[in-house]
Image (spheres, grey):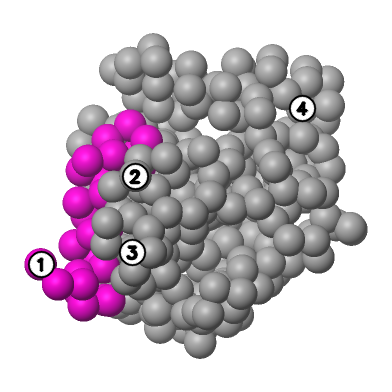
């Protein structure tokens, strides 16, 4: 596979790989690149077929996306602490199951066990590629972006989320991502994941929702579960100070970052 585009910050400390949601890109992690790079080498990818990354040479399933992330970790001398938001969290969980030697710990934010846990959710996810083809990236983003944050989010953030989505999603990469989510039901493999995991969820997440995060936290053996107040589905962008403080606390424990 062709090399993916990444944004990087920080020159010391543990490796922190950031995996974005299905309608986003590395731009979603601007707050983490800015703040957490004082403590870690932060790497945020544009998933294959997204934003500045080239289109994959053929269809990718969830294992394919996880393997692409694994290759990125190996290139950086791994292992890594892996932070995944939404779809990125599903990739992170599969990555930890397939490549446990490459994953020191996980931070799984506003995520789920996959859309394959519910036939209606899977059907809705599969319909998104046709919707993107019909509307085009800008109209698609204007329709979907605003619901990713809470009702109290500033207009500047809403516009940034919409602009990021419009500049990130395209076919066929988005279709591969949607199918990878629609096919995913990780519930059976969660108990075997050994990496210590921080599960976070915005208290106003209307996309995956608090219950989906609770399913993850309850099934994983080594977990801490945190609600991020006054945040929707993109807690890392809407409440970055609170979010980053929890991630840093997790890294202090799992990577022994000094106070």
Which mark, by number, is residue 34? Answer: 2
Of the numbered discs 2 and 3, the one sitting upstream in the chain is 2
**Picture residue at 70% right of the left edge, 35% below the top:** 169
Residue 130 falls in which quadrant of the image? top right
Q: Please give the count of numbered marks on the rendered protein.
A: 4
Which mark, by number, is residue 132? Answer: 4
**Picture residue at 89% right of the left edge, 58% below the top:** 58
Q: CA distance from mark 3 to mark 4?
A: 36 Å
- Above or below residue 24? Residue 17 is below
Give the side of residue 13 with respect to residue 9, left or right.
Answer: left
In contact (CB < 8 Å): disc 3 and disc 1 = no
Of the numbered discs 1 and 4, the one sitting upstream in the chain is 4
Q: CA distance from mark 3 to mark 1?
A: 13 Å
- How many other residues sit within 10 Å of disc 2, few (<14), some (14-19) or many (≥20)? few
Q: CA distance from mark 1 to mark 4?
A: 46 Å
**Picture residue at 26% right of the left edge, 76% below the top:** 254
């Amino acid at each position: 596979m062709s090399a993916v585009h990444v944004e990087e910050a920080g020159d010391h400390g543990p490796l922190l790989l950031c995996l974005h949601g299905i309608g986003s890109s590395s731009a979603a992690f601007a707050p983490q690149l800015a703040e957490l790079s004082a403590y870690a080498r932060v790497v945020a990818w544009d998933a294959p077929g997204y934003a500045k990354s080239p289109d994959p040479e053929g269809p990718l399933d969830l294992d394919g996306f996880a393997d692409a992330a694994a290759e990125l970790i190996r290139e950086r001398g791994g292992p890594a602490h892996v932070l995944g938001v939404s779809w990125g969290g599903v990739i992170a969980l599969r990555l930890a199951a397939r490549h446990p030697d490459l994953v020191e710990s996980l931070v799984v934010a506003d995520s789920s066990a996959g859309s394959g846990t519910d036939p209606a959710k899977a059907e809705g996810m599969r319909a998104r590629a046709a919707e993107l083809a019909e509307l085009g990236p800008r109209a698609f983003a204007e329709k979907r972006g605003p619901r990713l944050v809470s009702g109290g989010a500033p207009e500047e953030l809403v516009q940034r989320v919409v602009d990021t989505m419009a500049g990130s999603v395209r076919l066929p990469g988005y279709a591969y991502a949607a199918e990878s989510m629609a096919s995913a039901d990780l519930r059976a493999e969660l108990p075997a994941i050994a990496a210590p995991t921080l599960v976070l969820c915005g208290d106003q997440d209307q996309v995956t929702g608090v219950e989906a995060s609770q399913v993850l936290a309850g099934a994983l053996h080594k977990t801490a579960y945190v609600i991020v107040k006054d945040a929707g589905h993109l807690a890392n962008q809407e409440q970055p100070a609170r979010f980053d403080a929890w991630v840093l606390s997790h890294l202090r424990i799992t990577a022994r970052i000094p106070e």
